[in-house]
Image (cartoon, coloured by chain):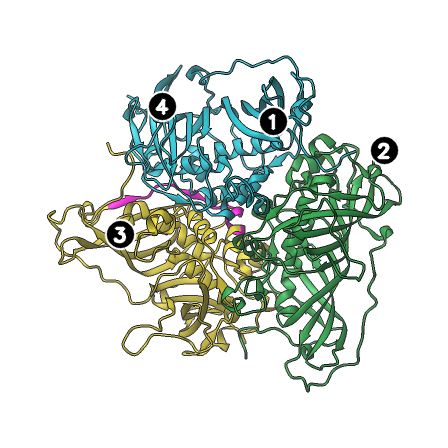
Chain colours: A yellow, B green, C cyan
Amino acid sequence: MTKAGRGNFFEDFTLGQEIVHATPRTLNEGDVALYIALTGTRFPIHSSDPFAQDLGLPRAPLDDLLVFHVVMGKSVPDISLNAVANLGYAGLRFDACVYPGDTLSARSRVIGLKENSNRKTGLVYIQTTGFNQRGEVVIDYARWVMVRKRDAEAPAPEPTIPDLPERVDADDLLLPEALELSRYDTQLAGSEALWEDYETAERIDHVDGMTIEEAEHMMATRLYQNTARVHFNQHIEKDGRFARRIVFGGHVISLARALSFNGLANAFRIAAINGGRHVAPTFAGDTLYAWSEVREKSTIPGRADVAALRLRTIATKDTPCADFPDQTEDGGYHPDVVLDFDYWVLMPRRGD
Amino acid sequence: MTKAGRGNFFEDFTLGQEIVHATPRTLNEGDVALYIALTGTRFPIHSSDPFAQDLGLPRAPLDDLLVFHVVMGKSVPDISLNAVANLGYAGLRFDACVYPGDTLSARSRVIGLKENSNRKTGLVYIQTTGFNQRGEVVIDYARWVMVRKRDAEAPAPEPTIPDLPERVDADDLLLPEALELSRYDTQLAGSEALWEDYETAERIDHVDGMTIEEAEHMMATRLYQNTARVHFNQHIEKDGRFARRIVFGGHVISLARALSFNGLANAFRIAAINGGRHVAPTFAGDTLYAWSEVREKSTIPGRADVAALRLRTIATKDTPCADFPDQTEDGGYHPDVVLDFDYWVLMPRRGD
Amino acid sequence: MTKAGRGNFFEDFTLGQEIVHATPRTLNEGDVALYIALTGTRFPIHSSDPFAQDLGLPRAPLDDLLVFHVVMGKSVPDISLNAVANLGYAGLRFDACVYPGDTLSARSRVIGLKENSNRKTGLVYIQTTGFNQRGEVVIDYARWVMVRKRDAEAPAPEPTIPDLPERVDADDLLLPEALELSRYDTQLAGSEALWEDYETAERIDHVDGMTIEEAEHMMATRLYQNTARVHFNQHIEKDGRFARRIVFGGHVISLARALSFNGLANAFRIAAINGGRHVAPTFAGDTLYAWSEVREKSTIPGRADVAALRLRTIATKDTPCADFPDQTEDGGYHPDVVLDFDYWVLMPRRGD
């Protein structure tokens, strides 16, 4: 019996396989405070119990991205310890809100497998679901990674590539139960700009920059119990491609979201993530900036108080975003872009 | 509509203006633990629920300075984002204790305005009040900053300079409701030295030093949701006057207070802050030392169990304080002094 | 009255002396989250309330080592502020579990004293006990340190060296009250390897490495309110033997324990610590690796669900442990070993 897990290789996965991930995690008030200390986030729904209660919630829910990172972290030892690359995720929806005291666990199902032509690696597609202690779904998404084979000669299964959505349909967005925005206070939220004030194709510079330290990204990543080695082991990474530890991409997303408060203060909930591309690695010492583009606007059936914006948030390193550094015409990116993140947020409507 | 806030300029303020600051914040147990981890504070009233209960409180209140920093942080986006300098604060009194679960919000009123003769900047005086979720005042103070004008030609209001107290009167100090010190345990508090044991003009070297790291001061400052840019953005600051990020002055105060435990272990509550001067900037890598001088002693009307000391705590960088580095005769300071902090503490009396 | 404590010297201790240590500490949910963020620990009993409840506990107890570090930290100002060396500890047993909301305090008794022949230092042996707010013992251990004399000429007491156990007897291990493992879930725990699967003399490489940053070890050590100066003051240490701050040995133990999850995932409780040797100092920038050896296996009287393993966990810096770097034949150690830690863990039995 091999006791120290060395992770699964491509040939260890089978189509339809169900994997229960280890280490359930009770999130608590300490996670709330640490998430604020590590990201500087200021969205009041996650910062203030009375603000959340005014919206019909029992208390301030945990940040949506914290939930994402914790659930993602659980799948690392089973799915991506031998990954060459984390290629993407799709169709991510947040469902039940998570509150301090709730316990998250995660399961994944293998929904696609395709060996690469070099036979040394293969693509593994999984559907991961995070649950609370009552078995309610809190998050659900597809993810695909390129995983090493233990043995290039090992036989490969029939290639199966799942049909993944380019984006979550606005009609499929899930709203927190009991959410009701008639008492939403824009003064306390820090901005008068509501859903009606944003236009498709509008671009917003989030202005501020945030420098990242090694201790910060490692503390964040350990908080999520994510064990991916490239974030933690300088003794190995000093001889690697970048000679440095790589900042967990989830921490980059969290910092970009925190920066986006400055311009999107009323985007109080991430309802879905359509996809995210870590265009370039981020390292300690880099200063992150961000800007966002409104890709779509959508009302929500039956709701006059809340609607959705589809955003694309771009983060750069060491480059302010007043000029909106972006994809280039050849399909590449401005050299300082590190993140291209596509997601749906909920925002209050101005009402009548 | 400009969505990304760029802060107010001098000409945006009007005398008597009331400002509701954004992002109410529920403080919790995570803040307690992080404040200990970031400062090393050991005052038992903030560390132990039973110790606080023995003094008549429902449980351990949050550190007074944590409350100050959180309330101050809320005012930054409205007041000091375009500040050239944070010039001072005065007349600060702590009122109701803050406990885990309490939610802080803050409002400010403009109490003075004076354009500078260069017409490029002006002084803004505000009175800031922090409240808990029941509307009870937890802190109240005046603060003044020098703020840029957007347009030097913009007309200026009549100069109004408020009358600010040089110090809080001892008779005006507020005691936590229900506080009663007959069961105060000096063994658990770590020192036998009570109010009677201190003399006016006495000087106390706090002995230890504490080195500051970038990750620590940034985590502390983000915990307070203070967004002042000089603390976070190395990409900008590398080209600034100091080529480095500046440590938030509040973190310097917190570290000096934590160091002062060694000599002032029974100074269990900061009741008021008379003023504070950040004599020189502090940077990551600096090692803080501190010493204190007893400026005044005052009994409290009707109380035999508790009295007040007015302290001046001086913090230095990279200079031990056995020789009490201080102001110089020309009104300047020893070159390594970074903080001159004047405040009232409560301390148990020896009794009969 | 000297107000700023400078610690006790050898001649300040008397045999049988009882010392009540200062600063009781209510541990809370923030400590849970910070301990995960600082160490990356993944043992589910400390991470998940429902997992702990399935084992009969009221909720997830705090990590055993966190309890050890907090109690140890309390004794530093009284015992080891003038220590030349922390020489060892013995006979450590964990007793009542500690839960968020519990308040720890500590007392020590001097159980041995022996002046060194140079008359400048002496050995002080103490028995330290940590209590919760109900007076229940949570931890108990002997510890000995070499302490400076204030005055070499001061008379020394009769030498008394206590009889310290080489190891805790397996029959004396204490189990958490109400612990019952019939519902222990190995899938959620992350490993199928139970007590029966380990063999005496078996060696396990824990594979991963973790790099330590200054901010991290200082935050951990302050969280435990441990004030030992070598961890915090670079201004002094730059001129010291290593020109650097030294990482608190307790943080090294915690990281080694967290790394040991990979191979010992079901070692759900440290029941006792037989001894620990900090073979070499650890510094920020070092990457810790670890391996473990099974020294003994023991059943527990009357229990078919749980048994004990005596482990030796060796941590190294900047040296992977696939080759099990160890003690050398001359009684020294491989040059990269920093920790040799001997302890008992509880592990579920496979049952019938």
The residue located at (66%, 67%) in the rendering is: B20
Residue A277 is situated, as x and y percent measured from the top left of the image, at: 33, 64
Q: Are marks 1 and 4 on the same chain?
A: yes
Q: Say which chain tag 3 marks.
A: A
- Residue found at the very far bottom of the displayed protein: B153
Q: Is residue B39 visible?
A: yes
**Which quadrant would the C terminus of chain C be assigned to in this image?**
top left
Q: Would you name the residue on which mark 2 appears?
A: B351
Residue A10 is situated, as x and y percent measured from the top left of the image, at: 20, 49
Residue C28 is situated, as x and y percent measured from the top left of the image, at: 56, 40
Q: Are marks 2 and 4 on the same chain?
A: no
Kindly state the secondary structure of the residue where label 1 is placed.
Answer: strand
Q: Tell me the mark number nearer the camera, choosing from 1 and 2.
A: 1
- Label 1: few (<14), some (14–19) or many (≥20) C-alpha neighbours in 10 Å: many
- Label 3: few (<14), some (14–19) or many (≥20) C-alpha neighbours in 10 Å: many
Q: Say which chain tag 2 marks.
A: B
Residue A273 is situated, as x and y percent measured from the top left of the image, at: 37, 63
Check if mark 1's residue and mark 4's residue have beta carbons within 8 Å. no
- Label for residue A72? none
Q: Would you name the residue on which mark 4 appears?
A: C330
Q: Please give the range of residues in magenta.
A: A18-33
Give the CA separation, mark 3 to mark 2: 69 Å
Q: Would you name the residue on which mark 1 appears?
A: C147
Q: Are marks 3 and 1 on the same chain?
A: no
Amino acid type at image mark 2:
Gly
Q: Is residue B238 above or below residue C159?
A: below
Give the CA separation, mark 3 to mark 1: 52 Å
Q: Earlier in the sequence, mark 1 or mark 4?
A: 1
Judging depth in this view, the residue of B296 and A13 nearest the camera is B296
Q: Tell me the mark number nearer the camera, choosing from 3 and 1.
A: 1
Q: Would you name the residue on which mark 3 appears?
A: A83
Judging depth in this view, the residue of A137 and C202 nearest the camera is C202
